[in-house]
Structure formats: C-alpha cells, structure tokens
Image: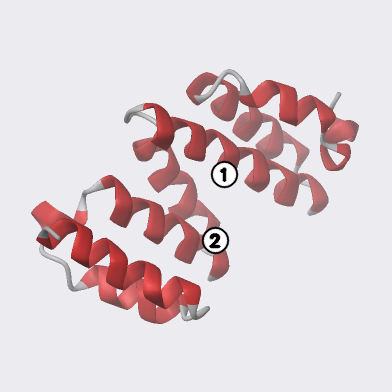
Amino acid sequence: MNHEREMVAMAEGYLELGEFQEAWDFTETIPCIQGICSGIVRVRIICAIALRHFEIAEELVCFLGTGPFPFRKFAGGILHELAGAYCHAGDTEHARKLISDAIRIWPDERFSIIENPALESLF
C-alpha cells in the first residue's frame, strides 16, 4: 500500500468510528503535498459537514468538483445535500446557489434534485 492510500485509510478509519474531530485533526497532520489528494479532501468534507462547518465543506466540495468523474459526482451529491439543509433552515437563496453549483459540477445530479421533496419549495 502506498503512503497516500495509507493516510486515506487511516483517516477513513476515524470516520467509520464516528470520530469526526479526530479525523479532521489527523488530516491536519498530513504534509501539504499529500494533504491535497482527493481521498483526504473527501474525508475533510465529511468531517466538515459532521462538525457543522458548512462553509468549509462548500469550499472543499468546489475544489473536489474540478477533479475526475467519481469526485465530481461525489461533490455534486454533497452540494445537493447541503442545499437541502439550507432549504430546511429557510435560506432558500443559498440553497438555490448550491443547487446551481451541484448541477454545474455534476449535471446528472439534477434528476435527484428534482425528485427531492425537501427541495420542492424551491421550484
């Protein structure tokens, strides 16, 4: 196993245990050049959402959304979920922006967005 995969596996281990702060702290210890790998960014997004740091999650998702197919698909799905959270909180303007970003990053996400009852007030 290469060092990058080892780091991702260790961070994901914290996630599996529900230790989101520990996972976040672990990713902070990874040297910068390795810390930008897509797997670590994905872990950090999950941690940021669990820790309710939505703005950080959005920034990371937009970064990840510039990557290859599986990461763009993941990013689109996360933006969709965040839009639902913002819509539920009454911030429909921000929810619409996130939906727009989700569709820009992963166009196929629009089908799930349209079917999401939590977002029906936006349409």
Say the numbered circle drawn on residue 66: none
Q: Are marks 2 and 1 in contact (CB under 8 Å)?
A: yes
**Rendering coords of residue 65 (x, y %):** 40, 32
Point 39% across, 59% down: residue: 43
Q: Secondary structure at mark 1?
A: helix
Residue 108 in the figure: left or right of residue 67: right
Q: Mark 1 is on which residue type?
A: Ile
- Residue drawn at x 81%, y 51% as measured from the top left: 88
Mark 1: give few (<14), some (14-19) or many (20+) Cα within 10 Å.
many
**Residue 1 versus residue 11 in the image, above or below:** above
The image quarter in which residue 119 lies: top right
Q: Position of residue 3 (x, y in %)?
A: 11, 62
Three-letter amino acid code at the position of disc 2: Ile
Left or right of residue 119, residue 113 in this image: left
Pick the front one: 119 or 3: 3
Residue drawn at the location 61% of the way across and 34% of the way down: 98
Disc 1 target residue = 78
Quarter of the rendering occupied by the N terminus = bottom left
Q: Quadrant of residue 28?
A: bottom left
Task: Say above or below: 66 vs 118.
Answer: above
Residue carrying label 2 = 49
